[in-house]
Image (cartoon, rainbow, N blue to C red):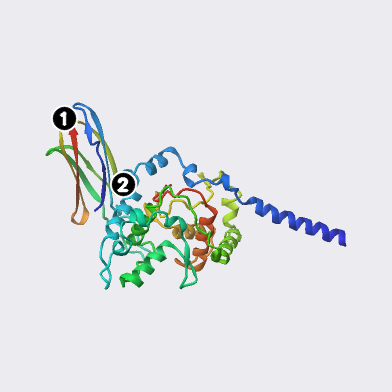
C-alpha cells in the first residue's frame, strides 16, 4: 500500500533527526456492525518497525483505537549514511514496506 | 389602503435586499482552512502528514494504468497531468455540450471512462474515483476558482442558489442560515464555516477518509433532517456549481484536511 515517508535527505553526524511516516490503511476496529447487524471483522495494522542499516531502531504495536491511515513520528541519531527500512504488518496477512535513504556527513 | 400597501411593499423590499445583503461580499470570503485550529492546519500544510496525499499518490498510479476494453489510460489522451490538468478542477462543474447540463469532475471522469476507455463507471465515493479526482484536482492547487463563468450555466447556477436559500428538513434550515448569516459562530462547539468548497475531495478526520463535496452536502442535509438528494442528482450538481461560483477567486487546496 501507499506510504509517505519524511526523512531528511542530509544530516550531520550526531544530529537528532525526526522521521515521519504515514501509511494507507482502513484500521477497521472490529467493533462496528453493518446496518443488518453483522459484525465488521477487525482489520488493523498490528505492528510497525523501522530499521536503520539493518538494525532495528524503533518499533510500535498498534491497536484498534488508532485512527485510519496511521501516522507515526519518532527521533533517532544520524550515525552513518544508509537506508531506513519501514515495515507495517497486520491482520489477514497484511504486510507493507517502504524505504528512504540518508546521507550523513 | 394604499398607505398599508406601500408599507407592505417597503417591508418586502427590505427583506429582499436584506437577503441579498446577507450574501458574503467577495473580499470577505474565507476558506474553511481559516476556521481550523493550528494542528489541523499543520496537518494539511505538510504533504507527508496530509492523509489526502495518500489518495493523490493512488490517483497518480491510476492515471497511467490502462483500463477498459479500449485498453487506454488517462495519460494516453491527456499526457502529463501536471500540465494538462492544471486549473481544470477550478472550473468544474462545467457544461457538457452533448448532455446540455453541468457535470462534476467525478462525472467527467466516469464519462471519460465510458466514452473513451470503454470501462464501467466507478461508483460514487469509491476509493478509485476519489483517488482520481483528488489527483486531478491536486494539479490545480493554488489556482483561483473560476467555475460558473459560462453564461449557458446561468439557469443551473440559479437553481443552485435557490436550493442554497431554501429552508428544508424537520429543522427547517437553509444552507444560508448557517453559512451566509452565522459563520464564525459555533454549532455544538464546532466553528461554522462559510462553506467555500476550496479543497474537495478532502480528508475529513471525522470520516477517516477522503470524501467528495456531495458526501459533505448529503451529511448537512441529514443534519437538518431533510431527505438527502442521491449522489449525482441534478440538485447536488447545481448546489456544487453555485458553491464553486460563490467561492470564485479563492485558491484551490485539494486535498484539504478538515476536522
Which residue is located at x 37 percent, y 64 percent? B109
Look at mark 1 in the image and give the residue it sits on: A79
Q: Which label sits on residue B259?
A: none
Residues indicated by labels 1 and 2 sit on the same polypeptide chain: yes
The residue lying toward the viewer, choosing from A94 and B23, is B23
Q: CB atoms at circles 1 and 2 under 8 Å apart?
A: no
Residue in the image at 50% along x and 60% along y: B240
Badge 2 is on which residue?
A: A66
Please name the residue shown 41% across and 66% down the image.
B107
Question: Where is the N terminus of chain B found, in terms of image quarters?
Answer: bottom right
The Cα atoms of the two marked residues, 1 and 2, are separated by: 31 Å
Q: Residue furthest left?
A: A54
In the rendered image, residue B245, in percent from the top left (x then y), is placed at: 53, 56
Q: Which residue, as the protein is rendered here, is positioned at the far top?
A: A14
Q: Quadrant of residue B80?
A: bottom left
Q: Image check: B57 left or right of B241? A: left
Examine the rendered structure and indicate whether residue B85 appears above or below residue A18.
below
Decide which of B217, B152 is in the foreground and name it: B152
Residue B166 on image: x %, y %: 60, 61
Which callout, 1 or 2, points at the residue further toward the start of the chain?
2
Q: Chain of mark 2?
A: A
**Which chain contains the residue that carries disc 1?**
A
The local secondary structure at tag 2 comes to loop
Amino acid at each position: 500500500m501507499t506510504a509517505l515517508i519524511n526523512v531528511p535527505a542530509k544530516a550531520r553526524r550526531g544530529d537528532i533527526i525526526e522521521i515521519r511516516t504515514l501509511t494507507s490503511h482502513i484500521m477497521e476496529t472490529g467493533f462496528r456492525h453493518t446496518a443488518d447487524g453483522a459484525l465488521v471483522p477487525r482489520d488493523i495494522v498490528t505492528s510497525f518497525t523501522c530499521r536503520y542499516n539493518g538494525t532495528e531502531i524503533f518499533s510500535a504495536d498498534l491497536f484498534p483505537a488508532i485512527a485510519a491511515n496511521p501516522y507515526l513520528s519518532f527521533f533517532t541519531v544520524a550515525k552513518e549514511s544508509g537506508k531506513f527500512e519501514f515495515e507495517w504488518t497486520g491482520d489477514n496477512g497484511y504486510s507493507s514496506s517502504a524505504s528512504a535513504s540518508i546521507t550523513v556527513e | 389602503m394604499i398607505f398599508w400597501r406601500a408599507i407592505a411593499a417597503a417591508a418586502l423590499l427590505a427583506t429582499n435586499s436584506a437577503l441579498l445583503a446577507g450574501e458574503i461580499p467577495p473580499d470577505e470570503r474565507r476558506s474553511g482552512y481559516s476556521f481550523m485550529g493550528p494542528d489541523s492546519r499543520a496537518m494539511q500544510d505538510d504533504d507527508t502528514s496530509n492523509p489526502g496525499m495518500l489518495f493523490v499518490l493512488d490517483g497518480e498510479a491510476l492515471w497511467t494504468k490502462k483500463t477498459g476494453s479500449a485498453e487506454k489510460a488517462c495519460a494516453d489522451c491527456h499526457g502529463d497531468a501536471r500540465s494538462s490538468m492544471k486549473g481544470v478542477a477550478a472550473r468544474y462543474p462545467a457544461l457538457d455540450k452533448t448532455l446540455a447540463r453541468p457535470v462534476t469532475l467525478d462525472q467527467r471522469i466516469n464519462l471519460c471512462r465510458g466514452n473513451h476507455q470503454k470501462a464501467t463507471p466507478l461508483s460514487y465515493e469509491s476509493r478509485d474515483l476519489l483517488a482520481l479526482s483528488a489527483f486531478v484536482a491536486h494539479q490545480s492547487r493554488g489556482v483561483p476558482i473560476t467555475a460558473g463563468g459560462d453564461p449557458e450555466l446561468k439557469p443551473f447556477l440559479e437553481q443552485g442558489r435557490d436550493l442554497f436559500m431554501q429552508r428544508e428538513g424537520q429543522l427547517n434550515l437553509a444552507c444560508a442560515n448557517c453559512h451566509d448569516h452565522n459563520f464564525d459562530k459555533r454549532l455544538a462547539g464546532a466553528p461554522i464555516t462559510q462553506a467555500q468548497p476550496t479543497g474537495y475531495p478532502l480528508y475529513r478526520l471525522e470520516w477517516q477518509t477522503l470524501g467528495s463535496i456531495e458526501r459533505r452536502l448529503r451529511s448537512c442535509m441529514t443534519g437538518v433532517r431533510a431527505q438527502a438528494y442521491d449522489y449525482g442528482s441534478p440538485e447536488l450538481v447545481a448546489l456544487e456549481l453555485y458553491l464553486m461560483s460563490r467561492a470564485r477567486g479563492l485558491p484551490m487546496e485539494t486535498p484539504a484536511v478538515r476536522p
